[in-house]
Image (tube, rainbow, N blue to C red):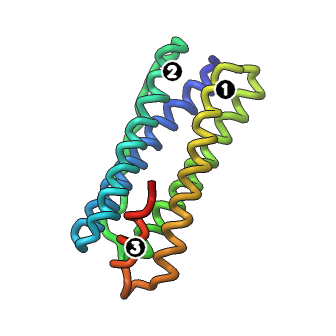
């Protein structure tokens, strides 16, 4: 694994921890508004992001790279509306997908087949993550801010 890929993977580790923090904030936002289902869903998403950070960390270690976790930026802690919190999640997932594609492209160009293949799991995961957050955002927009409690019924039917 070349240093450019190691650096990109370390940056991704930091990004995944930032995702974790964003989802924790989203969970707290929903909890404060009595949206228990949404709070639990965002907490589950946060746990997934922590798992992603560790998965990349473990890979870098296994590939004999040096893990250097970058400074983790504070995440938005206030949201103006329910729509804004779901939009933040969707936008973050799109950003994450773009970052993973960029690292995967680097691995392909470098002939780093192991990293390229490892990132296939993340590519597939991002399809699911973007789909979920897009659906949730659409439901919130469809019901409107005054009917956020209906998102709870929708979330209760998710697997």
Kindly report the distance in space between the C-alpha atoms of the residues bearing marks 2 and 3. 39 Å
Residue at 35% of width from left, 71% of height from top?
Answer: 152
Q: Going 38% across and 84% down the picture, which residue do you hit? A: 147
Which callout, 2 or 1, points to the residue nearer the camera?
A: 1
Mark 2 or mark 3, earlier in chain: 2
Q: Which circle, 3 or 1, is nearer the viewer?
A: 3
Q: Quick one: SS at disc 3?
A: helix
Task: Please give the residue where the numbered disc 2 appears in the rendered image.
Answer: 60
Q: Disc 2, disc 3: CB below 8 Å?
A: no
Q: Name the residue under label 1.
A: 117
Which circle's residue, 2 or 1, is located before the other in the chain?
A: 2
> Front-most of 19 and 140?
140
Give residue 128's mark: none
Q: Which residue is drawn at 58% across and 58% down?
A: 131
Q: Distance between the residues labelled 3 and 1?
A: 36 Å
The numbered mark, 3 or 1, whose residue comes first in the sequence reads: 1
Q: Is mark 2 on a helix, strand or loop?
A: helix
């Amino acid at each position: 694994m070349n240093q450019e890929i190691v650096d990109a993977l370390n940056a991704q580790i930091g990004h995944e921890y930032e995702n974790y923090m964003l989802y924790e904030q989203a969970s707290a936002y929903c909890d404060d508004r009595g949206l228990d289902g949404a709070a639990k869903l965002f907490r589950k998403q946060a746990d997934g992001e922590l798992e992603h950070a560790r998965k990349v960390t473990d890979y870098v270690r296994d590939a004999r790279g040096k893990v250097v976790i970058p400074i983790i930026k504070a995440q938005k802690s206030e949201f103006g509306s329910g729509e804004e919190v779901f939009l933040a999640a969707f936008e973050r997932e799109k950003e994450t997908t773009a970052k993973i594609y960029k690292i995967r492209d680097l691995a392909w160009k470098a002939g780093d087949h192991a990293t390229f293949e490892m990132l296939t799991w993340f590519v597939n995961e991002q399809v699911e993550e973007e789909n979920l957050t897009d659906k949730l955002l659409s439901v919130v927009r469809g019901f409107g801010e005054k009917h956020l409690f209906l998102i709870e019924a929708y979330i209760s039917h998710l697997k």
